[in-house]
């Protein structure tokens, strides 16, 4: 992971010091439970807590010899704890520590991600209400369709990230399990009450059945959820990038004083943040397929998943954390141009009202097929740049036989398209007024 796309709070969670601190807490809590059950001498866990410490460099040196990270860690701890260290890891296997630690890290990472999501939702809500009735053209297939408002546009993304928040909460609940069940998950050498104690202290739930590992379908779902959230970020980023195109320019990323867009062309103001977010989304999604492939482990356990998770655990959460905060900043500082939006809306001479005219003709007695033909033949003249749509309609005898000039004029009322905006906002935000 490179610092360029990292935030300190999330990066720190994946540093060796953090990982070994969690390992030590798991081992100490297990000893505490064993002591409470009378399985090891009284005072053992207190001695471990008071004396235990580790050095990352020393663990690395031991691991270089023994080729086993958990054994290297326990050896280093024993160098400080002394005789009571013989009661550490009793009846446990490496995965009890590794898997429980990974899930602790993912839960904590999720809480950080949730904070980023909340910031993005707040920014979207504020800007949506700010532009609740700002007219803009809706596009389908990239082509002008019918009017909407910029606030409604942002509301669609707010609703999407509300779903992202709900999914992330479910993913957190799904990943928040603990396993201290021994070599093949049978509890033959460790009491289930030890697992229960460790789980409770770490805010986890005991895994119902752990072979020697926590089942990886949980992790597959977790990383898939992060991938979906990344895709939602990309959808919003792509929208901003499209709106910033010179020939559209309805909104653009904030451009600070002294910022430069091009080494060659001083006039450039490029959407570099949202382009970066598109790339970060690809990196997050890159973890989804390996996480799914990790599900099919051999028998009770193999370690084909281990190297994958050492990479995708930190990389994916760090990238997504950075992306969420960057996206929140983009929306909070987004430059929005209502006049340009209205100008673009009117660019096609009123063609955005074609459906209203179609429906009015049907209501006046035309078949849908005839109505479509009448509207389209006039619309195509305007499309070709031959004048305003309303003027062509007023000059078409077949249309005027069905609809009066005043009736036609009334069909071009822009506010008509916004009569349900309050309804949409109430659905999304629970209210229609800021």
Image: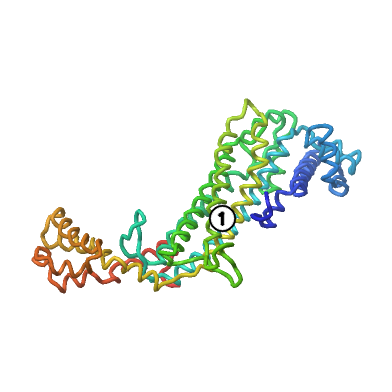
The location of residue 50, given as percent across then percent down, is: 87, 49
Q: Quadrant of residue 111?
A: bottom right
Q: Secondary structure at mark 1?
A: helix
Question: Mark 1 — residue?
Answer: 276
The location of residue 418, given as percent across then percent down, is: 32, 68
Q: Nearer the viewer, residue 104 or 265?
A: 265
Residue drawn 66% across and 51% down? 108
Q: Quadrant of residue 401?
A: bottom left
Residue drawn 16% across and 71% down? 407
Q: Is residue 179 visible?
A: yes
Q: Nearer the viewer, residue 4 or 113?
A: 4
Please give left or right for residue 84 compared with residue 323 in the image: right
Residue drawn 72% across and 53% down? 12
The location of residue 131, given as percent across then percent down, is: 43, 70
In the depicted structure, whether residue 82 falls above or below residue 400: above
Q: Is residue 158 visible?
A: no
Within 10 angstroms of label 1, few (less than 14), some, or many (20 or more) residues? some
Please give left or right for residue 411 compared with residue 167 in the image: left
Taking the view exactly as shown, the residue that stands out farthest to the front is 264
Quadrant showing the C terminus: bottom left
Residue drawn 67% across and 36% down? 306
Q: Nearer the viewer, residue 92 or 329?
A: 329
């Amino acid at each position: 992971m490179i610092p360029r796309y990292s935030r300190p709070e999330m990066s720190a969670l994946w540093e060796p010091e953090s990982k070994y601190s969690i390992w030590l807490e798991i081992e100490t809590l297990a000893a505490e439970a064993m002591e409470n059950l009378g399985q090891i001498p009284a005072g053992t866990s207190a001695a471990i807590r008071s004396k235990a410490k580790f050095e990352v460099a020393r663990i690395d040196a031991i691991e270089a010899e023994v080729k086993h990270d958990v054994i290297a860690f326990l050896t280093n701890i024993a160098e400080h704890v002394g005789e009571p260290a013989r009661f550490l890891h009793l009846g446990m296997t490496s995965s009890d520590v590794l898997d429980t630690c990974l899930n602790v890290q993912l839960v904590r990472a999720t809480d950080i991600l949730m904070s980023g999501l909340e910031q993005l939702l707040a920014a979207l809500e504020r800007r949506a209400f700010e532009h609740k009735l700002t007219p803009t053209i809706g596009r389908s297939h990239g082509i002008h369709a019918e009017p909407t408002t910029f606030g409604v546009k942002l509301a669609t993304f707010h609703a999407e990230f509300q779903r992202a928040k709900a999914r992330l909460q479910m993913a957190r609940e799904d990943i928040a399990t603990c396993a201290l069940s021994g070599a093949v998950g049978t509890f033959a050498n460790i009491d289930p009450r030890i697992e229960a104690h460790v789980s409770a202290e770490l805010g986890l739930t005991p895994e119902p059945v752990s072979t020697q590992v926590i089942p990886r379908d949980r992790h597959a779902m977790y990383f898939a959820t992060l991938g979906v959230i990344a895709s939602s970020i990309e959808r919003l980023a792509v929208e901003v990038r499209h709106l910033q195109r010179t020939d559209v320019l309805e909104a653009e990323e904030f451009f600070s004083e002294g910022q430069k867009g091009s080494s060659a062309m001083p006039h450039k103001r490029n959407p570099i943040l949202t382009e970066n977010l598109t790339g970060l989304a690809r990196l997050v999604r890159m973890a989804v397929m390996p996480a799914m492939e990790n599900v099919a482990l051999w028998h009770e356990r193999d370690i084909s998943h281990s190297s994958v998770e050492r990479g995708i655990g930190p990389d994916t959460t760090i990238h997504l954390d950075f992306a969420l905060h960057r996206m929140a900043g983009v929306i909070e500082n987004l430059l929005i141009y209502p006049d340009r939006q209205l100008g673009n809306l009117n660019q096609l001479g009123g063609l955005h009202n074609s459906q209203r005219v179609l429906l009015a003709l049907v209501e006046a007695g035309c078949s849908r097929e005839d109505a479509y033909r009448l509207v389209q033949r006039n619309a195509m003249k305007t499309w070709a740049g031959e004048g305003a749509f309303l003027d062509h309609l007023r000059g078409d005898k077949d249309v005027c036989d069905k609809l009066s000039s005043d009736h036609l004029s009334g069909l071009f009322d822009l506010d008509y398209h916004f009569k349900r905006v309050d309804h949409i906002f109430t659905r999304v935000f629970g209210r229609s007024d800021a």
